[in-house]
Image (cartoon, rainbow, N blue to C red):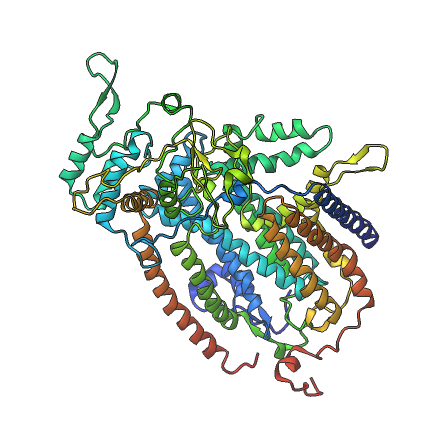
Amino acid sequence: MSFPWAQEYKPQGTVSKWVDERLPLPRLVYNAVGAGYPVPRNLNYFWNFGVLAGVALVIQIVTGIVLAMHYYASVDGAFNSVEHIMRDVNSGWFVRYAHMNGASFFFIVVYIHIFRGLFYGSYKAPREMIWLLGVTIFLLMMATAFMGYVLPWGQMSFWGAQVITGFFSAIPLVGEPLRQLLLGGFAPDQAALNRFFSLHYLLPFIIAGVIILHIWALHIPGSSNPTGVSVKGEQDTVPFHPYYTAKDGFGLGVFLIFFVAVTFFAPNMLGHPDNYIPANPLSTPAHIVPEWYFLPFYAILKAFTVDFGIPFTGIIIIPAKLMGVLAMFGSILLLFFLPWLDTSPVRSGHYRPLFRKFFWYGLIPSLAILTYCGGKPPYTQWVVLSQLAAAYYFAHFLIILPIVSRIERPLPLPNSITEAVTGKPLPAAA
Amino acid sequence: MVRLVAFLVGLFFSGMLLLGLGDTVITAIKEPAVPSVEAEFHEETLPVSFAHDGPLGKYDRGQLQRGLKVYSEVCAACHSLKLVSFRDFAALGYSEEQVKALAKAWKTEVPSINPETGEPATRPAIPADKIPSPFANEVAARAANNNALPPDLSLITKAREGGPAYVYSLLLGYRDQAGYKSEEGKELLKEFPEAATPAGLHFNPWFANLNIAMAAPIVSDDQVTYDDGTKATKEQMARDVSAFLTWAAEPKMENRKSAGWAALGFLLVFTVLAWMSYKTIWADKKH
């Protein structure tokens, strides 16, 4: 793998040599995130977010393991055990707030990471596998975050679990029995809480495993870059260490400043007050809303209001509820097909005038509208807006992108990364 | 093939959404949404500020002590504070002896058993106890309160939009419904005659559905006599107890803010150093 000019790991001392001959783990690290990995020299700050997502996962795992030492997965005790952590465990308030906001910041960096992939065409050949693994990580993250939100067993935890597991009951015939089987009861209760806790502890390690595959797949073709032009020679790359370790160190500092500011000064800003009320199966909150990072998908779910059937017969083939559920999952699953929907050979959005217009004036606003409307009560204006935005979302990926790739005339690409950076053409002999 | 299937799926989903859009619009025109009385008459929280507001804010110990007095003499008759222990009151500036005395003198005793007979009994509280609840269980609480359940107040400022300002507004928000007008001058009972407050409930435009089961708890000035000589106006009592309940919900707020400044200071130095090394390392590389 990698480029022929990649620096080779040369163990110095006797111990390093001894280890390298028996288990070349330092060599693996050196080649993965050390001087042995040549990276395009022109990466911009959007390329910091992969490393930041990794850091966010580590923060979640470390704080989560500590929380699990004090948390008690019981419908009678879960809420109070979280408050015990907040009040009586030494620095427990910090660990809990860091974990709670860490989830939000994990999604923020991952959304920026996905945004970068979408704009710069990082999903295109030869990097399809990285993209597929990335979408898998995203799905696993969503499952993990949802189950984690249920654990404090507040009102939104309980009713969120009720709504989300209710999706299964939309499946024809087997839906309701399936839902009961998964929950271990008719409604979320002790059995479900135990399952969620168990899976919430398991899935992050599965995510870590898929991340290793994600990085492995990345190291086959090497990192993409803002021009989308492939690396042509040694002058186009720099060793990951020290160049990008230094840049990532700076990016990490900036990220942590934002994270710390919210965690310490506005820890409940991104949460919902109702989750400080203990779960009560007999009292439904006025508005059940998920965490902010699920709002666009929640808006898509709610946007489907008419049944699909044969007109004038009253025969319903797909009821609106089922369609909402299908579309919500579909809105993420369609990302798996993206590398084959966008067939333009040009990767970077910079050189794609038509793609760029649809991206900035269509996709981004529609996602913003969906996020906003997802948190609103079902009043006409919000429903109409989310229907419009959701219709665009599906059209963008499934209809517009394939057509744009076919008819677009891309701008001229630079001959090489180095030329794009220095503005000078390469010497002819190279 | 992928693109053909995608095209059809996209057409289907987008089409159904646009159909739904048409349906939503037609329904909205045919049956325009009726404005609800809550939407028209529910009030935003009253403006109020506290010593603990903002990233530098600290609790005002004197205010917390006054708030505890209001809680213990007014609220505690019906509302529990289950997550707070007497020992926690040390953070309000009380000495160990004072905390012991406070626990011992608390109006409700702690459920216990008679050590001789094993029969249910009660005993005076000690600092390690949580604040005893005024009612033995939910049924007893409902029976004593016209079937309404007084919520536990331990987390009330975190569990309501607006936090302490909400508690403050609610406490001072009782109004006479007859002739009540919103700021825009709409008279409630003229616009919504059917929204008259039912018997046993109390009109309060700061409560979500405008009618709250709790009767006005703070009814007159000097309802509580403050030990520090502060004049106990209704506003003062409402403000003090809101501050106290903020502390009860977030006892570690001061640790959190001071740790936050330390963390930010450290990160600022770290980030500047990281930026300098980034610039140094890249100095010879155009990028």
User: Considering only vertical position in the picture, is A176 above or below A23?
Assistant: above
Residue A258 x/y as whole percent: 45, 61
Asked whether, in this view, residue A43 is left or right of residue A280, the answer is right
Asked whether, in this view, residue A405 is left or right of residue A36, the answer is right
Is residue B40 visible in the rendered image? The answer is yes
Give the number of callouts: 0
User: Considering only vertical position in the picture, is A155 above or below A413?
Assistant: above
Quarter that holds the C terminus of chain A: bottom right
Residue B206 x/y as whole percent: 43, 42
* Quadrant of the image occupied by residue A360: bottom right
Q: Residue at x 39, y 42 (%)?
A: B173
Residue A35 x/y as whole percent: 53, 70
Give the camera-side residue of B230 and A324. B230
Q: Residue at x 66, y 44 (%)?
A: A301
* Quadrant of the image occupied by residue A367: bottom right
Is residue A24 visible in the rendered image? The answer is no
Q: Residue at x 62, y 57 (%)?
A: A368
Asked whether, in this view, residue B127 is left or right of residue A301, the answer is left
Quarter that holds the N terminus of chain A: bottom right
Give the camera-side residue of A108 and A369. A369
Q: Residue at x 49, y 28 (%)?
A: A190
- Return the residue found at the far top: B117
Residue A250 x/y as whole percent: 46, 69
Give the camera-side residue of A411 and A370. A370
